[in-house]
Amino acid sequence: MKQLSTKVTSNGHGQDSSYFLGWEEYEKNPYDEIKNPNGMIQMGLAENQLCFDLIESWLAKNPDAASLKRNGQSIFRELALFQDYHGMPEFKKAMAEFMEEIRGNRVTFDPKKIVLAAGSTSANETLMFCLAEPGDAFLLPTPYYPGFDRDLKWRTGAEIVPIHCSSSNGFQITEAALQQAYQQAHKLDLKVKGVLVTNPSNPLGTALTRRELNLLVDFITSKNIHLISDEIYSGTMFGFEQFISVMDVLKDKKLENTEVSKRVHVVYSLSKDLGLPGFRVGAIYSNDEMIVSAATKMSSFGLVSSQTQYLLSALLSDKKFTSQYLEENQKRLKSRQKQLVSGLESAGITCLRSNAGLFCWVDMRHLLDTNTFEAELDLWKKIVYNVKLNISPGSSCHCTEPGWFRVCFANMSEDTLDLALKRLKTFVESTDCGRMISRSSHERLKSLRKKTVSNWVFRVSWSDRVPDER
Amino acid sequence: MDLLSRKATCNSHGQDSSYFLGWEEYEKNPYDVLKNPHGIIQMGLAENQLCFDLLESWLVQNPDAASFKRDGQSIFRELALFQDYHGLSSFKNALANFMSENRQNRVFFDSNNLVLTAGATSANETLMFCLANPGDAFLLPTPYYPGFDRDLKWRTGVEIVPIQCLSSNGFRITKHALEEAYEQAKKLNLNVKGVLITNPSNPLGTTTTQTELNILFEFISKNKNIHLVSDEIYSGTAFSSSEFISVMEILKNNQLENTDVFNRVHIVYSLSKDLGLPGFRVGAIYSNDKDVISAATKMSSFGLVSSQTQYLLSSLLSDKEFTKTYLRENQSRLKYRQRMLVTGLEAIGIGCLKSNAGLFCWVDMRHLLSSKTFEAEMDLWKKIVYEVKLNISPGSACHCEEPGWFRVCFANMSEETLKLALKRLKKFVDNGALTCSRKKTMTTISNWVFRLSFHDRDAEER
């Protein structure tokens, strides 16, 4: 009898085939404008495909960067051998400056405090290994990115305790919710090591308010715990408001160089802002030397390819490019979000008012036949099978209220988005104000339904799903 | 309250400044043929710099591969978005074929059984997460690559119990040593989950023999819960392909396909040594166990290979004319370079373990020790670093049971530099400078010297 670790064998548990269905259906029948116009439109993948033309044109003008050359000279050998876990200094400098630019140059990032990682998936896991023992807990506001269940908990043994956010106040984090989560952790005999937020939020598409950020910083100060701010979407902010980073708050509260500042860490990646998830570029930023030191060594398990570091250091060092890119990216995202929001509105569907991200948090509660997660699943299946749109149900994001869905808008063309909205409108109108469902189809769907959705649906259950579809 | 995890804080304990010294000294005073001809020559880094010209010339002839183009058309968007943890199939196919080629196509690798990882460092750790629980143990023959202490144990909680190999039989694994290690693990109340070998061996530079492989397979056939992991990262550095026997060949030759042993043998590979591309972070796990493949694939999310790099290398490795020439040339140049080091050392009266692979030699300097102790080995090492100005790796860093052995790399420098290094060494030996015993007070070397102790050293200098 062969024996594998419990990490492997526990894997198969809690697999919910219902969600697997949506992805499977898409893979079987993917929409293609010409080849498969009736296929399923993928709206569950938070990719940014809106600005590739800008990057491609930069590549055409700067061929050396990809061709492993510097000033026309081959630096292939140097790059082939470069495996220093401190990362390429030019690249870290360029990353630090890019992060500053995204924050309006209001705060500074010291390249020496940056640790590179193979994507923020790696960065988040590494931070857990540095901050938590097996059995320790991090508090996360719901709804949150389903991948966190794997990234933060799987191999680290850390636990997640949810901070329940509700639609009654636009899913904002409240002091009461924070305290309640903290107490809940204690009830479960879990030692709370910190809070992790995604800012701007996935799946909400909203940037944290100053009030929420102050609340968080005050909270971690009083409890003597860490705050991780995953700012992977920082460059997707398109609202009238400015993006407020946790680093802004530390500065404004004059907490720089204090003990508290050592417990605040930022995670970043180029997967969303630049649309480069394939290149595996993530980073941890910390004011705590010990964490930078430990995380640097741990980055050995997921270094960024030197070929990629070199290309991107050239790209990000081009300030003309970065400023043009950031501006254009925001403009296009804003326009695209507007298209989705108004399209949904005309179908009688509203969204949480968003100012960032690659998706909207859509309110379909009025389309549920009952205020239950079972009804949410029913509706989701209908949208997958009948409307042929793959969108993400709120329960997979640990939302405490049924009826919310995350719908992505930046991973397809305008025309495809139009088509998706048209299909949805048709569907909503055909179901008689979205309320009435015939008894027979309801029974049919009930028999299709598997066991009740567990909270761990996205754990590690999907054999064939594409990773990191945040 | 502890604000950081034990994993993060244990880092600073056990730091042995002695070893740190060698690296520090090199960084402070690196040899450069023009700018610093009296600097320290780096002979502690197992890099393969002998065939870059072949790679560079291929790149010149095939500019599309690095420029995100396929048949002249840009595939930038496709690559930018490609993050599927199953990996680029064209790359996995090319890699599987390359691995077969490395074994003269005596065995065949199925790309469906391959998991890509960010280097062998990531592959080895991932395999531990898949095969062992915290507190379980893996048996490793000594001497072994110092990085394993971090890679296999640090975040996984797995323990290493050494299989003690001695110079008396050329450091070969014996049945007795294997069983003794197993007993030792039991005494320490550790559940043995497997054996991990590096074949060809680092730091020995020797391929694992048929006899040793038979012993290992007999062991895991008898003990049905035990896995065998064969890190074959140096497979392409065997000077003669026929002398390298992969565990895949044993599975085939012994017709083990339909036995449970088949699912308990796993291979780790990487392009860091054979192709000299450690910076590109390309590693792989190969296993016949579907569950291992499935779990390892998901775990690879934590260390995927950049799609930019996958594409470049899939083009490179799909070029059969190139791979054939490269493998042959690589072997021939490594053999030649090893010869240079071995004869140079012989002329100084220094012997090496007879090696047939790798980027280094396992050098016998026992006769230069003032006493048969690790303290004397440390003394000698310091002299070689500070006075001879060569950075080489002392055997104790590799958990060698016997003092006096050193790993000396030969493929990370030019011929002239190697000749110079040998000249320097000869001068000192001839002057008797290395044999005079100087009493130095210093702390006993712990076995965990390379654990996490080097703040500033480059990662993965195997």
Image: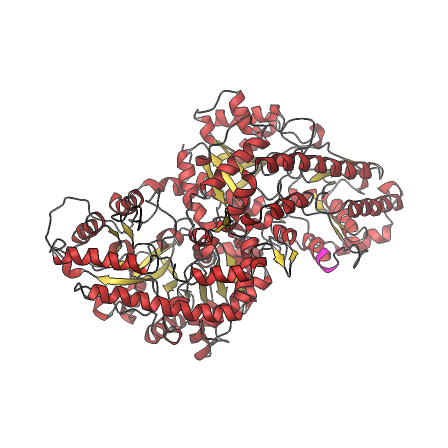
Residue B382 forms part of the magenta stretch: no
Q: Is residue B331 above or below residue B28?
A: below
Image quarter for residue B132? bottom left
Residue B352 seen in render: no
Q: Residue at x 28, y 70 (%)?
A: B174
Q: Left or right: A367 with respect to A395?
A: right
Q: Is residue B169 above or below residue A301?
A: below
The percent coordinates of residue A324 (x first, y second) are 64, 35
Query: In terms of depth relative to the viewer, which is nearer, B377 or B164?
Result: B377
Extent of the magenta region: A26-31
Query: In terms of depth relative to the viewer, which is nearer, B245 or A429?
Result: B245
Residue B146 seen in render: yes
Query: In terms of depth relative to the viewer, which is nearer, B248 or A153?
Result: B248
The percent coordinates of residue B431 (x first, y second) are 11, 55
The percent coordinates of residue B279 (x first, y second) are 45, 52
Where does the C terminus of chain A fall, quadrant-wise? top right
Q: Residue at x 55, y 29 (%)?
A: A246
- Which colour style is shown? secondary structure
Q: Left or right: B447 with respect to A341?
A: left
Q: Left or right: B20 with respect to A13?
A: left
The percent coordinates of residue B163 (x first, y second) are 30, 63
Q: Is residue A461 above or below residue A344?
A: below
